[in-house]
Amino acid sequence: MTRTFEGKLEGKVALVSGSGRGIGREIALKLASEGARIVINDLDAAPAEQTVADIMARGGQAVACIGSVTDTDFGERFVKTALDSFGGIDIIVNNAGYTWDNVLQKMSDEQWDAMLAVHMTAPFRILRAASGFIREAAKREAEAGTPVHRKVVNISSTSGVYGNAGQANYAAAKAGINGLTKAMAKEWGRYKVNVNSVAFGLIMTRLTQPLTAGEASVDIGGRTIAVGVQPERLKAAESTIPLGRGGTPEEAAGAVYMFCIPESNYVSGQVLVCGGGRP
């Protein structure tokens, strides 16, 4: 088969959590289109395996690591999959997540804890699991005089930058991932790892689909979580965006890609808002 995936990430290995569907899938496809070998993750096998198949059909390389990022052993499994399959780690994108909204006085401990688990604790565990490889690889490369820049991109939200009513749990978690980003940029700078966040505004995915006939839902770890936005609220939100519309998953992936390429080798500890100009 003629290889069609060649580009700025040729030979790199990227782990992308939550990449079977939506924004995560588009991030994986974008990185693969530039030559990266990808470890795909999703809660469910079918979408993860479909993304793997789509990458391989175009001449790329990908494997799946199925399961919830909130499982205590997931970080180790994710990293092991990359090392066993491709022999290294160059890019980590902590993308997996969802929303579980409520106003504060009606929010349960379970809702609060779930958002911190998926948006803060899971990325922490993945980075911790990767730290041994990163330290040793950086040491070897420095001794050989062949330094390599690695990339971590954590996915945040405008809710974590500006706050959002009805999302105290999600906003707190997404603000927390920005704090983790800034701390890790300082800790891992000596290993030549760039650590940045992308804070998404309104991106049109299954989680933000208009509700035209009752509530849609997704199953997360046995919980049924309502998703989607009332059409009038969606229209009002889009009216506040200077570009006049919500973003596409492909556009969201482009913002992440910018932090993964060599041109961003001197950019670290930053939070990039990808929101169409909406404050």
Image (tube, helix red, strand yellow):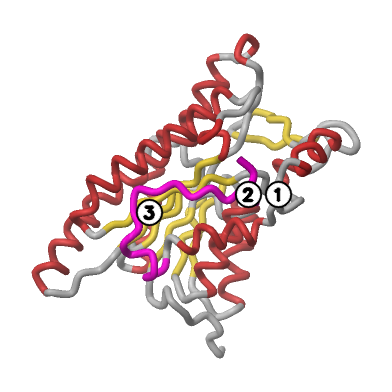
Q: Which residue is mark 2?
A: 277
- Identity of the residue furthest to the bottom in this view: 2
In this picture, is 73 found above or below 62? Answer: above
**Which of the numbered marks, if any, corresponds to residue 242?**
1
Q: Nearer the viewer, residue 80 or 130?
A: 130
- Residue 70 in percent (x, y) is at 46, 36
12 w.r.t. 194: above or below = below
Q: Amino acid at mark 2?
A: Gly
Q: Please report whichever mark, 1 or 3, sits nearer to the chain's N-terminal start.
A: 3
Q: Is residue 81 visible?
A: yes
Q: Earlier in the sequence, mark 2 or mark 3?
A: 3
Q: Residue furthest left?
A: 143
Across and down, in percent, residue 57 comes to 61, 77
Density class for disc 3 (Cα within 10 Å; few <14, some 14-19, many ≥20) is many
Q: What amino acid is found at the position of numbered circle 3 in the picture?
A: Val
The range drawn in magenta is 261-279
Type of amino acid at the residue the image marks with label 1: Pro
Residue most extreme to the right: 213
Q: Is residue 211 left or right of residue 249?
A: right
Is mark 2 in CB contact (under 8 Å) with mark 1?
Answer: yes
Q: CA distance from mark 1 to mark 3?
A: 29 Å
Q: Which residue is mark 3?
A: 152
Give the label on residue 43, or none.
none
